[in-house]
Image (cartoon, rainbow, N blue to C red):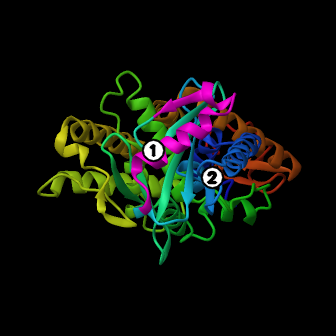
């Protein structure tokens, strides 16, 4: 029995369930979508600047690549939006584009009270629900519809960006696996399997690493590693593993190896713009790199313990410590409910000789017993 007697598949199920709890739900996504479509409509009606231009408004970042992580202790998500204006950027100054967006949002009775000015974007705070970062940009090249010039209004210059191209790169990396180990195991036994189309091991791995990052830096986030660095590292180091567990292990192993053996610091470049170093801050403030190395080493050591141990108590302790007590407990409870329901419906028992799940009534089998953890 590929799932019921497969510890790795069951661990992947626990990891998948934890990641799902961190995911942006459909109702929240629909609500966000409604809000950014309303903002698009408001901007389109602007007679003073925006109306003559063709443009798009689209999500990017973790919402677009499905790696959202609910903040610890909060019920609020980030939504990154690009305002992609299709005109020649040399005709406008960075300050003009930024200020025109600020002006237009400020003319709306609701939006003006929600605005928070950031370095390259304008944030709208939907209290207790989410905040939306709107990044204004003008198309950089006619031959590449994804490349943008975005304003750094503090420095007064354009900065090259490609949020949609980055998202395509990451999703293409995630889709190198067509069917995950967990989906294969569940479907092989006709156990109800959710829609795995948007739940690839790489996406789940990123969610879990980001969640661990949030817990690790919870007491002091001064030098917390950014999500774009972790997401890019994961995408670069991913080798097409079918298992969530193997995905995380491979990424962490490669980071640790490179941190230990490269002659200089680890450098993470934007995969769709090699001129952009996501880790350039590590040169100016090396404390960020020191904190990153300590964070990775701790995750690596805990993952090695998880690989070695087979006991319920030890495995539970490690997973709770890495990803949170509540997150793990809910995942374990949901998995147990599924397994017990399935075992009863299929009249399954436990072999007295091997401890494996078998058809009840067969030789050396016992009645169905309560699942405790990973089929034990």
Where does the image place residue 165, in percent across and percent down from the top left? 49, 65
Q: Can residue 340 be seen in this view?
A: yes
Name the outermost residue toward the front.
48
Where does the image place residue 154, in percent across and percent down from the top left? 34, 39
Where does the image place residue 341, in percent across and percent down from the top left? 83, 43
Name the outermost residue toward the left.
263
Q: Is mark 1 on a helix, strand or loop?
A: helix
- Quadrant showing the N terminus: bottom right
Is residue 97 covered in magenta?
A: yes
Front-most of residues 26 and 352 = 26
Q: Which numbered circle lies on residue 354?
A: 2
Relative placement, left or right, of 308 versus 192 is left
**In percent of the image, x 69 and y 28: which residue is there?**
109
Magenta region's main secondary structure? helix
Residue pointed to by mark 1: 209
- Quadrant showing the C terminus: top right
Question: Is there CB contact under 8 Å for labels 1 and 2?
Answer: no
The correct choice, above or below, for 358 with respect to 218 in the image is: below
Earlier sequence position, callout 1 versus callout 2:
1
Q: What is the span of residues highlighted in magenta in the rendered image?
A: 91-117
**In percent of the image, x 63 and y 68: which residue is there?**
179
Label 2 environment density (alpha carbons within 10 Å; few <14, some 14–19, many ≥20):
few
Where does the image place residue 295, in percent across and percent down from the top left? 32, 38
Label 1 environment density (alpha carbons within 10 Å; few <14, some 14–19, many ≥20):
many
The correct choice, above or below, for 146 with respect to 229 in the image is: below
Whole-Å distance between the Cαs marked 1 and 2?
Answer: 35 Å
**In percent of the image, x 40 and y 63: which residue is there?**
90
Relative placement, left or right, of 58 versus 149 is right
């Amino acid at each position: 029995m590929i799932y019921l007697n497969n510890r790795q598949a069951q661990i992947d199920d626990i990891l998948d369930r934890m990641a799902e709890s961190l995911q942006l739900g459909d109702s929240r996504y629909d609500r966000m979508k409604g809000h950014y479509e309303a903002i698009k409509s408001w901007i389109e009606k602007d007679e003073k600047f925006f109306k003559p231009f063709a443009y798009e408004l689209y999500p990017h970042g973790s919402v677009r690549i499905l790696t959202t992580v609910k903040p610890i202790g909060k019920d609020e998500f980030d939504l990154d939006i690009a305002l992609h204006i299709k005109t020649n950027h040399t005709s406008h100054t960075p300050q003009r584009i930024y200020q025109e967006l600020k002006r237009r949002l400020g003319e709306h009775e609701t939006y003006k009270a929600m605005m928070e000015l950031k370095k390259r974007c304008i944030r709208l705070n939907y209290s207790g629900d989410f905040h939306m970062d709107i990044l204004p940009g003008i198309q950089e090249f006619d031959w590449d519809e994804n490349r943008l010039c975005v304003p750094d209004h503090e420095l007064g210059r354009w900065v090259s960006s490609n949020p949609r191209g980055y998202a395509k790169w990451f999703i293409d990396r995630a889709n190198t696996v067509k069917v995950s180990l967990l989906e294969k195991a569940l479907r092989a036994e006709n156990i109800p399997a959710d829609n795995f189309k948007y739940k690839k091991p790489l996406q789940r791995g990123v969610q879990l690493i980001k969640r661990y990052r949030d817990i690790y830096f919870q007491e002091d986030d001064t030098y917390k590693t950014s999500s774009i660095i972790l997401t890019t590292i994961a995408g670069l180091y991913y080798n097409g593993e079918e298992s969530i567990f193997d995905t995380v292990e491979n990424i962490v192993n490669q980071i640790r190896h490179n941190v230990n053996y490269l002659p200089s610091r680890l450098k993470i470049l934007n995969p769709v713009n090699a001129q952009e170093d996501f880790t350039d801050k590590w040169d100016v403030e090396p404390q960020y790199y020191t904190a990153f190395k300590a964070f990775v080493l701790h995750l690596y050591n805990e993952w090695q313990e998880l690989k070695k141990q087979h006991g319920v108590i030890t495995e539970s302790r490690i997973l709770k410590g890495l990803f949170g007590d509540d997150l793990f407990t809910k995942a374990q409870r949901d998995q147990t409910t599924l397994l017990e329901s399935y075992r009863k419906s299929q009249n399954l028992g436990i072999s007295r000789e091997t401890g494996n799940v078998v058809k009840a009534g067969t030789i050396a089998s016992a009645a169905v017993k309560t699942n405790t953890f990973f089929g034990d």
